[in-house]
Image (tube, rainbow, N blue to C red):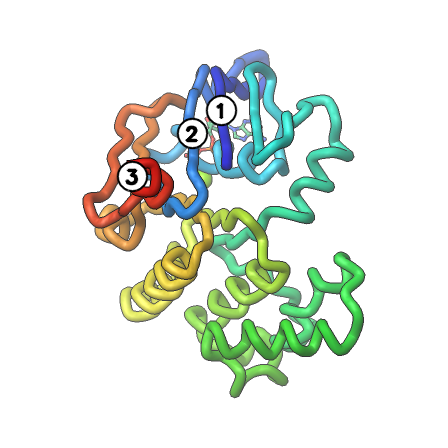
């Protein structure tokens, strides 16, 4: 699904250059669930932002599905992002003034989905994340775990090829964290490709692969035994 070939991304601030991603090469296959670990400042969020085409790269080759991602083309990235990526953030990023169902419906407006179809899709994901009983509530009336489930529903309602999650359990207690991780695992088992940044090594077993970053480089890349690569099995 994704190929990174020698990708670099730096930031210039106060005459100091920070290399957030340092000549990184990486291949992500459809159906994988990657957990990205590493100390603060090692480039985890930058990697996610580049994968999600929120941020551009300075150097290297980035292929997404059949597309060669053009660094210079903000328009191409916006289009690819809209059609293929679902984001989940640590702080949920729901719109306070909109109800649960309105928050979830929002991306469908941007996709110009007709009203009946919007309702059908919203009903479907409300059930998927088990929050139908709270559909008319404002986010502030929900627990953190419920808010994150709404954010997940909003991320998946357009059926994106790739789900990106930046510390999705960072603001949750352990019980709600487990619920969110189990939900992400179910989505992965149903076919979603997921890349998740996490501060919690105890959560990596929900995924299929672990990346560890240090100073913008991959220092560890391990597959978790339970993951079966269907494409390789099919090829014998
Ligand atoms: P992590 O998510 O692993 O904590 P980040 O990807 O956010 O790390 O940041 C990696 C490095 O790049 C850090 O040194 C950070 O200060 C720097 N950085 C990230 N984004 C920016 C930015 N927009 N402007 C300047 N420096 C940045
Ligand atoms: Mg970060």
In primary-sequence order, the first of circles 1 and 2 is 1
For disc 3, the neighbor class at 10 Å (few under 14, some 14 to 19, many from 20) is many
Q: Is residue 143 left or right of residue 230?
A: right
Nearer-the-camera pick, 127 or 65: 65
Q: Earlier in the sequence, mark 3 or mark 1?
A: 1
Residue at 76 percent of width and 58 percent of height: 110
Image quadrant where one finds the C terminus? top left
Local SS, label 2:
strand
Badge 1: how crowded within 10 Å, few (<14), some, or many (20+)?
Answer: some
Asked which quadrant contains residue 215, the reply is top left
Return the residue at label 2. Answer: 27
In 3D space, how far apart are the residues under numbered discs 1 and 2 (Cα atoms)? 6 Å
Residue drawn at (49%, 18%), measured in percent from left and top?
Answer: 5
The reply to whether discs 3 and 1 touch (Cβ–Cβ < 8 Å) is no
Determine the secondary structure under disc 3.
strand
User: Which residue is at a point 56% across and 60% down the rendered structure image?
Assistant: 156
- Looking at the picture, does residue 51 appear above or below residue 171? above
Q: Find residue 160 and report its horizontal and vertical position in percent.
A: 58, 53
In this figure, what is the number of numbered marks? 3
Q: How much space separates mark 3 and mark 1, taking CA atoms? A: 17 Å
Q: Residues within 10 Å of mark 2 (few under 14, many from 20)?
A: few
**Does 76 sit above or below residue 102?**
above
**Residue picked out by circle 3:** 210
Q: Residue furthest bottom?
A: 133
- Residue to which mark 1 is pinned: 4
Q: Residue at x 60, y 64 (%)?
A: 157
Q: Are marks 1 and 2 in contact (CB under 8 Å)?
A: yes
Q: First in sequence: mark 2 or mark 3?
A: 2
Q: Position of residue 38 (x, y in %)?
A: 32, 34
């Amino acid at each position: 699904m994704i190929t990174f070939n020698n990708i670099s991304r730096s930031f210039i601030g106060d005459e100091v250059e920070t290399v957030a991603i340092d000549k990184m090469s990486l291949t992500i296959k459809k159906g994988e669930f990657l957990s990205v670990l590493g100390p603060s400042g090692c480039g985890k969020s930058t990697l996610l932002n580049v994968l999600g085409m929120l941020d551009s790269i300075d150097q290297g080759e980035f292929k997404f599905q059949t597309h060669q991602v053009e660094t210079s083309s903000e328009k191409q990235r916006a289009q690819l992002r809209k059609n293929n990526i679902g984001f989940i953030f640590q702080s949920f990023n729901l719109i306070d003034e909109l109800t649960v169902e309105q928050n979830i419906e929002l991306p469908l407006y941007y996709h110009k989905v007709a009203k009946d179809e919007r309702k059908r899709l919203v009903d479907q994901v409300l059930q998927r994340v088990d929050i139908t009983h709270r559909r008319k509530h404002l986010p502030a009336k929900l627990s953190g775990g419920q808010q994150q489930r709404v954010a997940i529903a909003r991320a998946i309602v357009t059926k994106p090829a790739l789900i990106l999650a930046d510390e999705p359990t960072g603001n949750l207690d352990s019980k709600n964290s487990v619920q969110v991780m189990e939900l992400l695992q179910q989505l992965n088992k149903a076919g979603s490709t997921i890349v998740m940044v996490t501060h919690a090594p105890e959560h990596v077993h929900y995924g299929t692969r672990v990346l560890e970053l240090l100073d913008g480089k991959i220092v560890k890349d391990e597959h978790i035994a339970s993951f079966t690569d269907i494409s390789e099995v099919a090829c014998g």
